[in-house]
Amino acid sequence: NAGVMQNPRHLVRRRGQEARLRCSPMKGHSHVYWYRQLPEEGLKFMVYLQKENIIDESGMPKERFSAEFPKEGPSILRIQQVVRGDSAAYFCASSPPWTVYNEQFFGPGTRLTVL
Amino acid sequence: GESVGLHLPTLSVQEGDNSIINCAYSNSASDYFIWYKQESGKGPQFIIDIRSNMDKRQGQRVTVLLNKTVKHLSLQIAATQPGDSAVYFCAENSGSGGSNYKLTFGKGTLLTVNP
C-alpha cells in the first residue's frame, strides 16, 4: 500500500514563474491537506480539499495561491508569480473519509526554492 | 491566537537512555493530539496519538501522557536509539466548530542520540 506521494521532490523557480506541486493521496483516502513549513518551523495549515471541493482554504494566501483536487488525478497546489518568500517545504497529507479523529498521513514534501 | 508550543527546542541523550519531549498547548477545546517524527528531508511520520478522554497511551517503546489540567503533553521514548534522532512535533486538533481536520503544530524539538 503506497503512502502519500508528492512530486517533484525539489523544485527551483525564478521569481515571477509558476510552481505546480502535485500530491497523490493514499489509496482509499479522499481528503487532502496542504501544509507549508518554513525552516526550523512547524507545519502551517494551508488548505483542505475533498474530491472536487475546497472545504477550507483559510490558511492559504488569497493571491497567487490556488489548490484543486479533481475527480481524477492528483491534488495540485499552484503558486503563480512566485516570490522568494514562497521558498519553503510544502507537505501534503491525506486521510480516509471515515475518521472521526483526524489521523493524517504525510507525504515526503516538495522543497521549493525561489531564486 | 491559540497555539501549541514546546518547552525544549533541543534534547541530547545517550543511546539507551529514556527521552522525554514536552509540549504545552493553549486551546482547552483540543480533544485530539498527535506526535510526529520528522527526519531530515522527509515528511512527518505518525508516532502515536491520544484523545482527550485518556491520560496515557502506550505504543512500541513510546508513551504519550496528557495532563489536561495544565494543558501539557509529553512523549516518552524508552531505550533511545540513534535512529530516533529527528525533530519531534506535537500537533493538536481542536475538533471545534466543524473544523476538526485542522492540525496545529508546535515548533518542534530536535532530539539527538549520541552513540
Image (spheres, coloured by chain):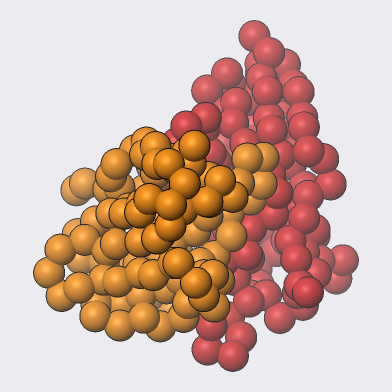
**Image point (58%, 21%), residue name:** B81
Q: Determine whether B104 is above or below B37 in the image.
A: below
Q: Position of residue B5 (x, y in %)?
A: 77, 55
B14 sits left or right of A30 in the view: right
Residue B12 locus on image (x, y percent)? 76, 23
Q: Give the colour in which the image draws chain A.
A: orange
What residue is rendered at 45% in x and 67% in y?
A64
| Furthest-right residue in this view | B70
Q: Quadrant of residue B115?
A: top right
Residue B55 quadrant: bottom right
- Say which residue appears at 36% left-offset and 75% top-offset: A49
Tally the numbered discs.
Answer: 0
Horizontal side of B7 relative to A14 (left or right) equals: right
Per the rendering, the colour in which chain B appears is red
Q: Is B87 on the left-hand or right-hand side of B72?
A: left
Residue A97 visible somewhere in the drawing:
no
Q: Nearer the viewer, residue A103 or B62?
A: A103
Q: Quadrant of residue B52?
A: bottom right
Return the residue nearer the eye: A44 or B22: A44
